[in-house]
Amino acid sequence: MSYFQKNLDTIIGYTQSHFELVFLAVFISLILWVPIGIMMTRNDKAALSIMGIANSIFCIPSLSLFAVFVVIPYLGLGRRSALVALILYSMMPLLGNVYRGIKLVDKTVIEAAKGMGMSARRILFEIQLPLAAPVIFAGLRTTVVMTTGIAAIAPYIGERNLGSIIIIGLAQPNLDMIVTGSILISLVAILLDTVMGFFEKKVIPKGIRISQGR
Amino acid sequence: MIELKNVTKKYKGQVKPAVQDLTLTVQTGETCVLLGPSGCGKSTTLRMINRMIEITTGDILIDGENIRDKDPDKLRMGIGYVIQLIGLLPHRTIAENIATVPRLFGWPKPKITARVNELLELMGLDPNTYRDKYPAQLSGGQLQRVGVARALAVDPPIMLMDEPFGAVDPLVRNRLQDEFLRMQKQMRKTVCFVTHDIDEAIKMGDKIAIFNEGKLVQHGTPQEILSNPANDFVKNFVGADRFLKKLNLSCVADAVRPFDNKITKDEVKTYVQSDMLLRDALGVMFEYNTDYLGVLKGEEILGTVSFHDIRSLMSQKEGE
C-alpha cells in the first residue's frame, strides 16, 4: 500500500481521467446507438447486417482495435483513438439490447395501441421504450462495466488512466502497483454498476416490476 | 352504418386473396357476427374497417364516408377495438389504460377520472379497488372487462371485437357475453364481432356473416342461417344439431299457451320461468319425464308449454 500513499495525487489524476474516458465513451455511445437501435427495429434486413458488424467488432481483441486507430490520421495516439474503439465496442451490448428490447415488446400491446389510434411516435415513447427499458438498461450496465475495463488498456496507446498503474507495474515489475491498479479499476467498475442499479429502479416502470414479481 | 363494397384484400406474394369481392352492410345499432373457420378472412375483414389492414380494391364506407379519406389514427380513435389478447399496457394502471383514448382526444383530467370510474362500475369492477392496480394483478375475466371498458371510453358509435371472449374459460365467457348483451341493449352500438364459435355467434349476433376461404357464404339472422343453410359448407359448419341450436333462439314465452280442458294445472309436474330458453325447458321436461311444463312470469301463472308445441314451433320456423 506504500505506492498508494506516496502517489495519491497521481492516482487521483488517473482516476479522474479514467472516469472522463468512460463517461465520454458511454455518453457518445448512447447518443449514437440508441437512435440507430430504434431505427433498426423498422428494417429487419438492415438490422441483421448491422448486428453482424457489431458482433464482428466485438470479437476483435481490444489491443488490436486500439492499435488500428492509432495509424489513422487525426485519431492517432491518445484519447481520440481510445474513444472510437470504446464506442465501437459498446455497439454490441447497447445497440443490440435497444433492438432486442423493442422487438421483444408484446405485439398485442402494440396492435391494441395502434388500433386505438396511437401514432407511431406515441407508441415508441409511451409504450416501446418504457417496456424495453429493462433490456436497454441491462445493455447500458454491461456497456459501462465493459468500458471501464477496456479503458484500462488505453494507456498502451498514450492515454493516461488507472490502467497506467498496472502497465507500469507490470513493466518494472512492481507488485504493489499491479495490485493497487487492479483493485482501483475493479472498485470503479463496481461503484459505477451500483450507481446504475440504483437508477435502474427509477427508470423501470412500476407495472413492469410488478409483472416480473420484483 | 358500415358498408363494405366489393372489398378485396390480397397479400403480397399470395395468389389467393384473403378476402374476395366482399359486399356486406352492417346497419347502425346492429351486432354483426363474422363467423368462420380460421383463415377464412373474418379477422382480415374486421381489421380493414379500422385500417389496421389496408384494402387492396373496393371501398369501405362508415356512415357514408370513405375510410380511405380519413387519417388512420383519427379513424381508429373513433372506433372501439377489442382483441382476444386484450393488449393492455402492462406499465400503466387500469385507470390509465382505460384513459388511453380520452387522453388522445385531450379530455380534461376531471372528465377522464369521472368517465373511468363510470366505466369500471359499468363493468362491475369497484373503482376504489381496481383503479390503481396494474394489469398483472387482475384475473383473465377482469382484464377482458377492462379491455371492453377501454374500447368504450369515448363512447364510440362503432365497436370492432376480434374474438374478445376467446381467451377466458367457458363460465367467465358466458358471463361476459351476457354482460355485453345487456349493455348493448342500452347502448345500441354498431358492432362487428369476430368468432369461430357458432354458439357464440347465435347468442351475440343480430346478423351472422359466414365466411369460407375469403368469401362471404351467407349473411342473415341466426334464425335464417340455422333454418336455411345456403350450402353444404354452412350446413356442416353450423352442425347437425342446428335444430337443437334453434332452441337457443326462443324462450318459453314464445311457445306458451293458456291452460285449457286438454291440459289442466293438475297435469303439470313443475313450473319454469317464461324467459327460460326452450332448450333448457326441454331439459326440464326430460328431467321430470313429462310433456308439459307450467309457465310462470315471476309469481304469476301464464299457462303451459308442451313438447308438442315446441316441436311445431321449431318446424314452423323451418319454413320461413
Image (spheres, coloured by chain):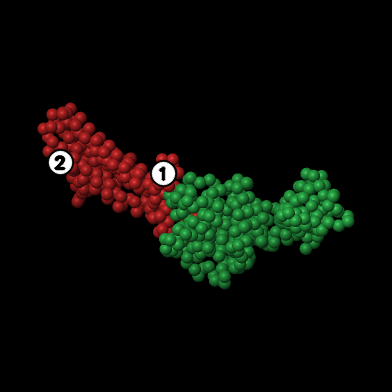
Chain colours: A red, B green
Task: Name the quarter where the C terminus of chain B is drawn.
Answer: bottom right
Residue in the picture at 31% in, 52% down: A32
The answer to which image quadrant residue B42 occupies is: bottom right
Q: Disc 1 and disc 2: Cα gap in Å?
A: 40 Å
Residue in the picture at 19% in, 51% down: A74
Relative to residue B266, is residue A9 depicted above or below? above
Q: Is residue B69 left or right of residue A204?
A: right
- Which circle's residue, 1 or 2, is located before the other in the chain? 2
Q: Chain of mark 1?
A: A
Task: Name the quarter where the N terminus of chain B is drawn.
Answer: bottom right
Toward the right, the furthest residue is B261
Q: SS of the residue at dot 1?
A: helix
Relative to residue A76, is residue B82 depicted above or below? below
The answer to which image quadrant residue A21 occupies is: top left
Q: Mark 2 belongs to which amino acid? A: Gly
Toward the bottom, the furthest residue is B64
Q: Position of residue A171 (x, y in %)?
A: 16, 31
Residue under label 1: A209
The residue nearer to you, when weighing B40 against B50, is B50
